[in-house]
Amino acid sequence: MQPNPKAQTMRIQINTDRNIEIDETMEAPLRDTVEDALSRFSDHITRVEIHLSDESADRSGPHDMRCMMEARLEGRQPIAITHQAATMEQAVNGAAEKLTSAIESILGRQRAQRQRLQQADALPDEATSPDEP
């Protein structure tokens, strides 16, 4: 079986602000979280960018970790969402959930529109249908 030339992998890029240092051991679970959340849409997503920032820098406080996630879908404008939480993991999980919901909504509307068009094409043309008594 030959690999599908159209098949592509969803690339995930993680960016941080100057207040956050992330190493490979921290990066892998974050990637896994995003891959797991978005895996069913991987055929539609070309790239996901994750931007992590510490909103309060040196001061600690509730919901000071911010995750902005942007997904690039084939043939569509990028989708961007943000989520703030107490920890980086919570911020990434929340952002992944929001992004999943947004993509479900967009692809669902697209699928419904396609179905409506197919149904309209399947209906007989009123101009050519015989008149009923």
Image (spheres, rainbow, N blue to C red):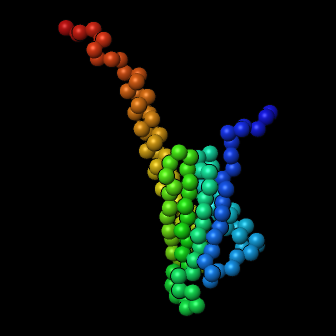
- Looking at the rendering, in which quadrant would you find the N terminus? top right
Task: Give how far across and how far down residue 50 sits, in percent.
Answer: 60, 66
**Number of numbered discs on residues:** 0
Task: Give how far across and how far down residue 88 sits, in percent.
Answer: 61, 76
Question: Residue visible at 28% across and 14% down?
Answer: 127
Relative vertical location of residue 70 with respect to residue 92 in this rendering, above or below = above
Tell me if 115 is positioned left or right of 21 in this view. left
Task: Give how far across and how far down residue 2 sits, in percent.
Answer: 79, 34
Tell me if 99 is positioned left or right of 42 in this view. left
Task: Give how far across and how far down residue 13 sits, in percent.
Answer: 66, 63
Furthest-bottom residue in this view: 59
Would you say residue 86 is visible in this rendering? no
Tell me if 14 is positioned left or right of 1 in this view. left
Would you say residue 51 is visible in this rendering? yes
Question: Residue visible at 59% across and 50% down?
Answer: 45
> Closer to the camera, 132 or 4?
4
